[in-house]
Image (cartoon, coloured by chain):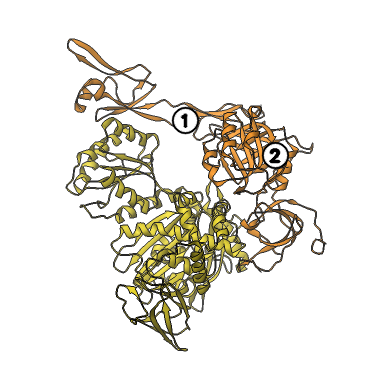
Amino acid sequence: MGDRPVLQTILAADIGTVWTHAALIERVAGIYRLAARVDSPTRDVGRVDLHASLAGALARLQQLAGRPLLDGDDAPILPRQGIQGADMLAVTTSAAKPLSCALIGLTKDLSLGPGREACGLAGTEIIAEIQLTLDRPLRHRALAGLRTTPPDVIVMVGGVDTGPTRPFTGAAAVLATLYAGLAPEARPVIVFAGNLEARRPVADALGPEFDYRVVENIHPRLGESHPQELQRELERIQNERHLPLLPGYAALSEWAGTPVMSSAAGMSIVLQFLSQQGRYASRVLGLDAGASRTVALSCGIQDTPALASGPGMVDDLDRLLDGDGLACIRRWLPSPALEASASALLRNRALRPHTVLERPEEGLVLLAAAREALQRPLTALAAATDSDPRRVDLIAARGGALCRSGSDGQTLLALLDAVQPRGVTDIVLDRASIWPSLGALAQKEPLAALQVLERDALHSVGTVCSIDGRGIAGRPAFHYRVQDATGIQEGEVCWGTLTRVPLGQGPAILRMEPLRTGRSRHEGTLQPLHTALRQGTPALIIDARGRPVHLADSDMERYEELETWSRTLR
Amino acid sequence: MVTHPALTGGRAVLETGVAIQRLRELPCPGEVLVAPGDQLEPDDLVARCVSEERVLALDLARALQVPVEDVPRYLLVHPGQQIEPGTIVAARHRPLRPMLRVRADERGVVIGEQEGSLFLRASADFEQLRAYIPGEVSEVYPERGVLMQSSGHVLHGIWGAGREAAGLLSLEVADAGAPLAWHRVTERHYGMVLAAGVLQSAVALRRAAQYGVAGVIAGSLHPDLRQACRDAPFPVVITEGMGRIAMTAPAFSLLQEHHGSRVMLAGDSRLTASGPELIIPEPIGSQGASLAAVLTPGIGSLVRLTGFAHMGSVGEIVSMPPEPQFSPAGESIRGAWVRLADQRMVLVPLENLELLGIAPPDALALIR
């Protein structure tokens, strides 16, 4: 350890499907700091080219930093030569296409349903579902289809533990026949997430040629669901199989000082760190409203991270707007004109995702879409985990739709509406778009990652104290008292309102007392609250809109309340 | 020196009078049927390969009327065996009753038997690759494809559906913002590529399919018609975006000039090599053409505005301030002042500009 050279300069990059974010980290007075960062359009010719995208971003970065980072062949100068280049490169990417997945299950509702949900959580694209209780000819025809168009992965689900094994072994034998003669690397990975007893017989029926992986039964007993291990395995397969297929992956792997990993994996490392550091939070909810997918990640001190994904804001816009998606987005917009233009604006932005917002109203539409996009993985996450992902200490959010669409206040409001957190919650943003690459960097240089994260990459937008329950709009709900070094701020908050209390830099104490006078009317029992607020948070937001947040039925009233909330946090 | 990377090197939406090269590549190794120097028409075959195989399941247990575990006893073929249509793959003798025979319907190879079914890999059809543009075979890549070379004008689309087609261009509207009216699509448009300002009518699309239209190009598309376009038997190319946006003036002028010319259209970028585009082949100057030059923006550059606020507008750059500016959205941006056709001056982020061409530098632009 003592002989290891101290790194002076580090490059960190996160390559998405639309933007490539690159950052230059320098050691200044013994501490790693973010020296410069750029966003550059990702180079995409059919598929994202990792090398070209990184080179494009580093070309901009070197211009900004005023020092050469690329050599004549557009390769990063590694290791550093004087003031040229850097000592290390850490890269993450979210540009790999989703795994194509075929689901084989016993029954439609009890097996394929939970299997579909679990695969959805991992962001896979399901191309076939085969029910093993189907008539044999139909079943065989469907299985033959998996040879005609082989998926990346076949997931076998179904059967509570001690359930039947024969349907699985039969299907496995058919798969072994169908893929006979095909090289092992050309065959799909088979993941068995079904009943315990069938694991070994399925392995025997498949034979040694398949990449066969066993995970915990997603449905071991009636009423019990354990999709997390399947989900993690699918993420792992995605990283093993799809990342290396991206053009430029080999070059990046050679240059990078840490394994090139998925952005979600990088972000997960950062969230785990935040949840394990007592001074930040014990329960963290990570949100990423990205172009290719929207991700919700839940992290606790004890738990392994749980992940759910939903449609992205660019690549998957059709899925986001399908059904009542567009109507749900429109209800967050404060004027009929914006409601009318929402669909065209979102669709045109998906066609030209590199364009920059020119009017504030465009940001309102994007944030409304982000609210809806985040709802889906959050709902899936709540269904898949035992704990409520909305009851967290910290919400850590990132993604272009959230961080580039408006002021901190507008983003905060969008996050409050989408998550509707309970209790006291800090909210931080990844304005520098650097969390995933810091996660990758932490694998090798944890101190550098930690110092940059703490000093430059946690953009605090506020602490929210949310009042659960429901009361009559306009009636007093709580009396609040905030004491910090600058003095005392106090007042009443009414049901249906948001209140913003600006905070100083020092520590602050919040006291909330329910108003039990005849003037206050509400459902349930309100509890007093006495808590210390995290230092460095710019404002306390008291959200007395109740849970769940209910928007007025009348359009005019809804426009008015959206406008009022927006004005409060602006 | 200040550079503007958002614009530098960007592909122009409109390329006029340029050499055009298009790589024609097979999806899998196959056979190239042409040689360098061959002169081809768009429909000429350049290469072919065996398309994706199909796997079939024959239910022998049911056909032979035996339990699944007995099926192997009656099999007459073995894994790897080549079979022809009509080949008897299994047979069962029944005392005093006609013999049960199962015949293959298609040519193929036996994969194997399992659970009473025989799995066969059916022989695949040939996938054919055509020249797409008229011109010369410039290079041949054995087993993979060819590089075709031609010259003319290219109009790039922002969205497309369907594959490739060729036909005579028929501009159906007089105004860049006018819709393709359903009653204008008639049987006289058989094999033609229709052009209009905007595409808002599902009926027009249905009639285009009914009358065998070769393709449609328009400035913008009603978002609800995207699926109808994908289902149409011809390619559709959209140049500006979704909604009701007029086609950019220079693009519309190009179509007006070449009304009646033969054009090529390519739709969905996932189904075509080039992505959405319209090509108008035309011989160009005796000096020979160069490939579309990488344009460098500057004062006087003609640009298309692609942000939602000014989508479809065309203007001229009159100033490119070196320092960041504040946009109306409150963001610090690198932008350019652009004079629109109605003489309004707007500050536009560089990311929201696409170069259409370079006008001669005009030092007096700012004070005009």
Specify whether A367 is left or right of B201.
left
Amino acid residing under circle 2: Val
Which quadrant of the structure image shows residue B89?
top left
Q: Is residue A13 visible?
A: no
Specify whether B93 is left or right of A553.
left
In this rendering, the answer to whether A146 lies above or below A471 is above
Which quadrant of the structure image shows residue A271?
bottom left
Rendering coords of residue B155 (x, y %): 67, 42
Mark 1 residue crowding within 10 angstroms, few (<14) / some (14–19) / many (20+): some
Quarter placement of the N terminus of chain A:
bottom left
In this rendering, the answer to whether B147 lies above or below B222 is above
Rendering coords of residue A14 (x, y %): 49, 60
| Chain where mark 2 sits | B
Rendering coords of residue B303 (x, y %): 71, 53
Q: Secondary structure at mark 2?
A: loop
- For this rendering, which residue is in front, B325 or B209? B209
Label 2 vs 1, first from the N-terminus:
1
- For this rendering, which residue is in front, B102 or A81? B102
Q: Which residue is mark 1?
A: B51
Counting labels gives 2
Q: Nearer the viewer, mark 2 or mark 1?
A: 2
Q: Which residue is mark 2?
A: B173
Chain in orange on the image: B
- For this rendering, which residue is in front, B272 or B184? B184
| Chain where mark 1 sits | B
Q: Residue at x 43, y 81 (%)?
A: A535
Rendering coords of residue A463 (x, y %): 43, 75
Mark 2 residue crowding within 10 angstroms, few (<14) / some (14–19) / many (20+): some
Chain in yellow on the image: A
